[in-house]
């Protein structure tokens, strides 16, 4: 396989996928490269359902294999929120800054030991006339008290991966991609990728 279409418009994810698939020699295309202006509504109640909706809608339309990523941040002290609502936690506008400040406000006064969280990434691989498969990757960490670092996207500036004293936004792209939820999910696609 030389090219793979990812059913996303999120530039942060696209950048992650480009780097993560380069070692397989696979070029990544996204919805930003296609003439696809429709908004796919994420009406599911789980990462799996939403990933399937995105992958299957696009695979059906273009009749090629499509990978979709539904991901988010689960914070234990917030009973798993923002979870599947991570992209739109502070409103439908999808504002990364507003989202992370909402989280920081909700965690105000909560001590470090109770600020445990994890990034979750569920990948759905949809192919025409073949049942969709799912792979899940996680990355455990702690939510900091204020944003630190300029790299990455989303909640990266407030997420300290377990055992690290830097946020994901302070890491280089390569460092993030060695430990991230997204890379852990892709590693499980290894079999399929090497067969193709
Ligand atoms: O700091 C982060 N580093 C990451 O590595 C990461 N991965 C996911 N997230 C958060 O979870 C939402 C996904 O929601 P999501 O899967 O619905 O994607 P999205 O709506 O942004 O794009 P699409 O793929 O649906 O088009 C994103 O917007 C982010 O807020 C991350 N935050
Ligand atoms: Mg989305």
Image: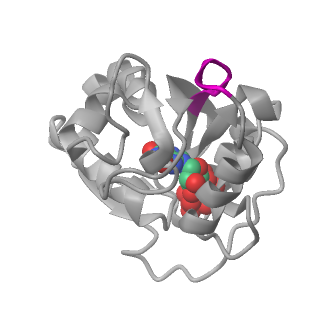
Q: Eyeballing the image, is 119 above or below 129?
A: above
Any part of residue 190 in sight: yes
The residue drawn where x is 43% and y is 32% is 160
Residue 126 image point, x, y percent: 57, 43
- Which contiguous range is marked in magenta? 111-119
The C terminus lies in quadrant: top left
Residue 138 image point, x, y percent: 52, 25
Q: Is residue 103 left or right of residue 140?
A: right
User: Foreground residue, 9 or 78?
Assistant: 78
The residue drawn where x is 48% and y is 64% is 10
Q: Is residue 36 left or right of residue 16?
A: right
Q: Eyeballing the image, is 32 above or below 169?
A: below
Residue 148 image point, x, y percent: 38, 50
114 within the magenta span: yes
User: Foreground residue, 183 or 61?
Assistant: 183
Q: How many marks?
A: 0
The residue drawn where x is 46% and y is 27% is 185
Residue 105 image point, x, y percent: 71, 52
65 within the magenta span: no
Which of the 4 image quarters holds residue 119?
top right
The N terminus lies in quadrant: top left
User: Foreground residue, 89 or 14?
Assistant: 89
Which of the 4 image quarters holds residue 93?
bottom right
The residue drawn where x is 63% and y is 67% is 98
Any part of residue 65 in sight: no
């Amino acid at each position: 396989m030389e090219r793979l279409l990812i059913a996303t418009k999120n530039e942060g994810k696209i950048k992650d996928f480009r780097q993560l698939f380069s070692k397989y020699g696979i070029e990544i295309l996204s919805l930003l490269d296609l003439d696809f202006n429709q908004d796919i509504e994420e009406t599911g109640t789980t990462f799996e359902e939403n990933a399937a909706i995105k992958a299957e809608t696009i695979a059906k339309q273009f009749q090629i294999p499509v990978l979709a990523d539904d991901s988010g941040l689960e914070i234990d002290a917030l009973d798993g929120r923002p979870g599947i609502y991570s992209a739109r936690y502070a409103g439908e506008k999808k504002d990364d800054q507003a989202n992370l400040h909402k989280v920081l406000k909700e965690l105000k006064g909560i001590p470090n030991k109770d600020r445990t969280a994890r990034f979750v990434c569920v990948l759905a691989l949809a192919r025409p006339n073949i049942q969709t498969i799912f792979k899940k990757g996680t990355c455990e960490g702690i939510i900091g008290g204020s944003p630190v670092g300029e790299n990455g996207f989303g909640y990266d500036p407030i997420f300290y991966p377990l055992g690290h004293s830097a946020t994901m936004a302070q890491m280089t792209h390569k460092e993030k991609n060695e430990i991230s939820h997204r890379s852990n999910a892709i590693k499980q696609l290894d079999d399929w990728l090497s067969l193709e």
